[in-house]
Image (cartoon, helix red, strand yellow):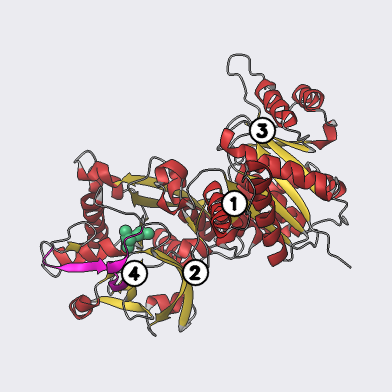
Amino acid sequence: MKTVRKYVFVTGGVLSGLGKGVTTASIALLIKLLGYNVTAIKIDPYVNVDAGTMNPYMHGEVFVTEDGGETDLDLGHYERFLGVNLSKDNNITTGKIYRAVIEKERRGDYLGQTVQVIPHVTDEIKSEIEQIANRYESDVTIVEIGGTVGDIEGLPFLEAARQMRLEKGLENVVFVHVVLVPKLSTTGELKTKPAQHSMQELRRIGIQPDIIVARASEALDGDARRKLSLYGNLPENFIFSNPDVDIIYEVPLILHSEGLTKAVSDKLRLNYREPDLSAWKVLIENYRSSTKKVRIGMVGKYTKLKDSYLSIVEAVKHASLNQRVKPEFIWVEATDIEKGNLDVGSVLDGVDGAIILPGFGARGVEGKIKAIRYLREVGKPVLGICFGLQLMVVEYARNVLGYERANTTEVDPTTPHPVVDLLSYQKNVLVKGGTMRLGALPVRLVPNTLISDIYGNAEIIYERHRHRYQVNPAYIDDFESSGFKVSGFSEEGFPEVMELKGNEFYLGTQFHPEFKSRPISPSPIFFRFVKTILTRITI
Ligand code: GLN
């Protein structure tokens, strides 16, 4: 018997940044809990081939997949909610689609034809979606179309989705439209007009939404529901309210209690059974009942857009929720320290521990180094990630080893002490897109170290990477003889983890442990980091 694959397309109306990714991830989880095999795809209609070359200020964090994809941060939500590893292919962009179409055209695959958006580009989109569904053998594939309905660049993707519904049938393709219903501060009314317009726009291109998820600061009232039903041309019981919540892991619980699981299941003719959401309920219960608080300093240079460090924030939350503690994030802008507008002592005295965040380039580096020195000297728990580790190394070389002008060659190519230097094979790499050291790679842990204890004495771990520079192995002896120990090595033999003897938790990793952290199974590093802080506060 031929397997029937089913699809849920999630579109967005009114404006972006609505939490469409969390809604998509929640729907994916709810269907998975019905006992189906589910995968999720993010479509980003921008022309970049992937998110790797974009500034996090433009687009938020670049999420790194196990297979080394530099993807949209929504893939992080999908992985965290579904508890699975996805591939770089689960992120489709206009750049990828056009690259494939143009390669085919050059090869002669369309010989004799005029290559057009319809059918060639739309066929490529449909074929990529179906290939992923086939590869994962998924019963239901959730496809989130990024951006907002009405964007010119999103049109080919919506058209492809419309065609898929026509080709596969009503019971195999469902459209969920996520809209914002703003509240007027003057009258306190929930206004549905912008949502009405976006639903009209969808219909204009031939898509009738089956389900509306309304994002609002509060639950929808009867009047707003009636209007969305009337103007959206769908029954009221297919309109779901998704109000603002403190913690995103509550969204599946809310959508389920509103009846969304049953609605999607009915539309797709799935077998319904009550999903077991107990693990998620426990998380929320932990959050509600937590009385303790940990204050985490977040030292970085993209702190004005919190999404720049999304997976790290989530990883801290996972570690905290599972220990019944609420994290409070104190954002420490490194460029402000650098310019002398922010005093390290006054801001860092107020934190219980700090994370030195990943990053690129010279701006903010001296500010970060000042913060690192302060934290090391007062002995607060510090976790350095990627660039964070590299700058912990630079700070140590300057202030403990006495190499005054020590630096990373990323910042100062002529430093006499290149304690952090370009990975040797990167010296010949000129192309920027997709050429860093990327994805899950083995790290060999040194026995009897903090990191080895954190990972339950594992000898080899696999964590995800995204870097071009490395701690220079030529300096390992210098560091180790003064107590800054290398406790994890790459296969090539350069430092992947370093930890300082004497400080309770002063640890840096070249890899990014945040990408594999999940609400139900937190990253062991973040878990221990929060645990160490907790014991220090409560002693
Ligand atoms: N800029 C550093 C490198 O390329 C660190 C990268 C990062 O923090 N992700 O090695």
Real-space CA distance between mark 2 and mark 4, rounded to the nearest whole angstrom: 16 Å
Q: Position of residue 142 (x, y in %)?
A: 70, 52
Q: Which quarter holds ligand 1? A: bottom left
Q: Residues within 10 Å of mark 1 (few under 14, many from 20)?
A: many
**Residue picked out by circle 3:** 179
Real-space CA distance between mark 1 and mark 3, rounded to the nearest whole angstrom: 28 Å
**Label 3: element kind:** strand
- In magenta segment, residue 400: no
- Circle nearer the viewer, 2 or 3: 3
Position of 121 relative to 321 (above/below)? above
Is label 1 in contact with label 4 (beta carbons under 8 Å)? no
**Residue picked out by circle 1:** 287
Q: Position of residue 146 (x, y in %)?
A: 59, 42
What span is colored magenta in the figure?
415-431
Is label 2 in contact with label 4 (beta carbons under 8 Å)? no
**Label 2: element kind:** helix
